[in-house]
Image (tube, rainbow, N blue to C red):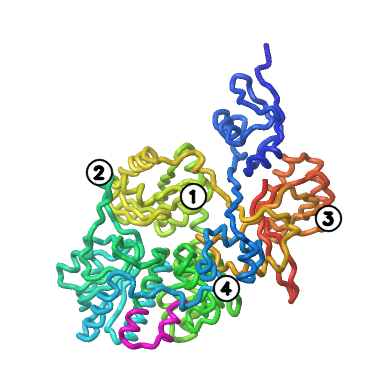
Amino acid sequence: MQNNSLPISFDLQSVRREYGLTVLCLHDKMQISKPTLIKIEKTGQIPFDSYANYAKRCPTLFPEKEKIMRKRWIELRKGGDFDAIAQQFHISPAVARIVRNRGIDKTDQINKYLNGRYEDLYDPWMMKDMKKAVDIIKELIRKGVKIRIIGDYDIDGVCSTYMLNRGLKRCGADVDFAIPNRIEDGYGINVNLIEDAYEAGARAIITCDNGIAAIDAVAHAKEKGMTVIVTDHHDIPYEEIDGKRKYKQSVADAIINPKQVECGYPYKGLCGAGVVYKFIQALYQSCGIPESEVKPFIEYAGFATIGDVMDLTDENRILVKIGLNMLAHTQNLGMRALLRANKLEYQKLSTYHVGFVLGPCINASGRLDTAQHAMRLLLASTEEEAEASASLLMKFNNERKAMTQENVEKAIAIVEKDMPDDKVLVVYLPECHESIAGIVAGKVRERFYRPAFVLTDGKEEVKGSGRSIDEYSMYDEMVKCSRYLDKFGGHPMAAGLSLKKENIESFRKAMNENCRLEDNDLIEKVKIDIVMPVDYATKEIVHDIEKLEPCGKGNEKPVFAARSTRITGIRVIGKTRCGVKLTLLQDDGLVMDGIFFTDPDVFIEDMERRFGTIEKDCLLAGNAEHTRLNLLYEPRINEWQGRETLQINIRDYC
């Protein structure tokens, strides 16, 4: 019997270099049957996409544990006179190039990006309905009308509620607040909250971080004779009729939201707390309250901007930069207690500390119980109250972490088993706590780089959250499938929804049938700012890079790439084996350390697949001679006992 299998050896290193892709867990030699033999270039190499497609057709060649992970590395090459920019703004040419890569080219834009000040914030009066809202509030205060604030249960909503409550009281308002319970009330203002406010004697409502989509609820409040002001930052709801958008009209007395079509405010990317800050700024000006009393609110607006994952561009950069400095020296007893509980007191703070340490503690109370706990933290008037609140939020957050991990594992298993070909993932986890559905959806999106919805059983119907990728506007796509939804809202990158259980499968099918994502859209892009050998990195460049802070969404940390870097040794680091330390040998003999936070066993196994058992053993012994990798990295300065050393943090390799 003729052998129908042809052994072919692939030069995987060349594949990786040529296509700039990360290929993990592939054998260097594979048996490919003649009938399904795919086109191979004369060099004996094969494009990765073909590799992936072949693997999909012939899954038996790829054991379940051997996953193909794809990322496309793209070097940014925006032109400019980097030397001139560097000289004018006292930065290195390398950092000047990074600034240009962010799409910033005009002199005034570069100056604002690098040196934005409080004075560069836009005039709040430019926002539509600002004067109307300020005049209404002043009249309500003059008449002694009781005002109720209706906020939201996440970081943005809590900070917005705190700011409005404090700001309105300073102006003499009779005001209190209500934050919806995530389970009982769901998101935003609703009829029950309006009835509660009315029964409590409130005849005016002002929303924050919600309200723009609550068309019926606002109409109900108006029918009861209440005054309603909406402050929000979410997308304006619309219906798509004959391919055209028809925006829904609210009967609120005033709407402050820069995303309104008629709003001429120059920056549309504020979070809810950012919008509230603008309102308080205008209100204080109108009431004759000194500007010095407005500035402290930036601490909370900046905190919420990071926590709500807004683009750190334009005005947001200024709010966050000033806000982080204020937070490090906060006078708020609750915030100080939370910093202390997380061992961050008296430290220089970054967007990481808010986004991944402090912010999740604020969010956790609204997820697992009530956001009133987070409000108590911010309103604490004694050290004892502050410490108790901080301790409770830490407890909630630890519980949230455990719940998240369990449900992420379940969701990943469902995707791999039941919907491997879906481009839009709709995962139903009936027992998942609905408060963590958004976090789980985000983790699923990261794992598969596809838009992901996680649905779970709510009190009366199925509820869920979605997280998207850059190539897919989630809210717009949900509009097309709204016939299956009872309620939904959001923006291009995230959404919330509720629907009947019997509509889950129809919703999943419709979202995928309408999906126009191509295969290339589902390959995560990693943008490289500069291709530069690791030994070109210096402490001076690292300090220069700090001028690009704050970094985050919309202003990512700079990414460097180094070609064909020689690795002579590997050492597992950390008591919990949290990563590996690589010994990097440069052509001039310079030795540097590279830290890569990953599963050490998976990494070492991959080195063995790539370079063989003997070379893997040499790597572990520290005397390897034939291992070379392309690296994505970030140079950092490691401070220890007063000494500064340059450290290379590796983000990816191929």
Amino acid at the residue labelled 3: Asp
Nearer the observer, disc 2 or disc 1?
A: 2
On screen, residue 569 above or below 261: above
The answer to which of marks 2 and 3 sits earlier in the sequence is 2
Q: Which residue is mark 3?
A: 588
- Foreground pick, 268 / 430: 268
- The kind of secondary structure element at disc 2 is loop
Query: Quick one: quadrant of the N terminus?
Result: top right
Residue 231 place in picture, x, y as percent: 31, 69
Foreground label between 1 and 4: 4
Pick whichever of labels 1 and 3 is earlier in the sequence. Answer: 1
Select label 4 or label 3 by which is in front. Answer: 3
The answer to whether 510 is drawn above or below residue 124 in the figure is above
Residue topped by disc 2: 242
Between 409 and 579, the residue placed more toward the observer is: 579
* Helix, strand or loop for disc 3: loop
Q: Earlier in the sequence, mark 2 or mark 4?
A: 2
Figure quadrant of residue 125: bottom left
The secondary element bearing badge 1 is classed as helix
The circle on residue 349 is: 4
Tell me which amino acid carries mark 1: Arg
